[in-house]
Image: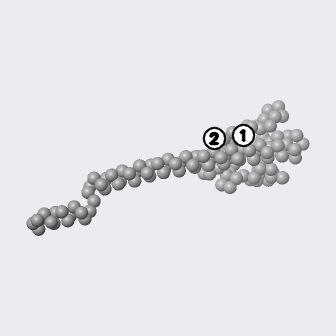
Amino acid sequence: MSNNQHATQGRRDEGFTLVEILIAIVVVGILAAVAIVGINSLTDTGNKSACTTSADAAKAAAAAYYANQGGNYPTSFAQFTSEANATPKEFVLPSGASIAGATSVSGNNGKWTLTMTAGVNGNAPTFACS
C-alpha cells in the first residue's frame, strides 16, 4: 500500500461525511418540531383549564353575591371581585388575571378571556371562556 492510499483511507475514518451531518440536522429538526407542537398543546390545555376553573369560581361567587345582596345577581365583575371594593369580595381574581372590561376578565397575558353575561329577569349570570 502506498503512502497516498494510506493517507486517503485515514482521512475517511477521521470525520463525518456531509450526508451524515445533513441527516443528523434533519433528525434534530424533526424532533424539535414535535417538541414545539407538544408544548403548544400543553399550554393551550392549561389556558383552557385556567379559564374553566375561573368560570366555575365566578359562578360560585355570583351565587354568594346573590345571597349577600338580598336576591340580586351581579351585573359586572366590578361588583364582586377582589379588584373592586366589594364587601365581601366573593370572587378573587386568579394570579395574573385582571378585569378587561365590565363583563370580562383576561388572564395569562390575554391568552384566555372569561366573559360574563348578566342574567335577565332575575336569572343568574352566565360565564363563557374564549
Taking the image as shown, residue 54 lies to the left or right of residue 8, namely right
Mark 1 highlights which residue?
127
| Separation (CA) of disc 2 from disc 1 | 10 Å
Q: Secondary structure at mark 2?
A: loop
Q: Amino acid at mark 1?
A: Phe
* Residue 55: % across, % down: 72, 44
The quarter of the picture where residue 104 lies is top right
Taking the image as shown, residue 62 lies to the left or right of residue 95, namely right
Point 84% across, 34% down: residue: 122
Is 89 above or below relative to 125?
below
Q: Is residue 106 visible to us here? A: no
Point 64% across, 50% down: residue: 107
Mark 2 highlights which residue?
130
- The one nearer the camera, 14 or 6, is 6
Task: State which quarter of the image contains the N terminus.
Answer: bottom left
Q: Is residue 66 visible to us here? A: yes
Task: State which quarter of the image contains the C terminus.
Answer: top right
* Residue 89: % across, % down: 80, 52
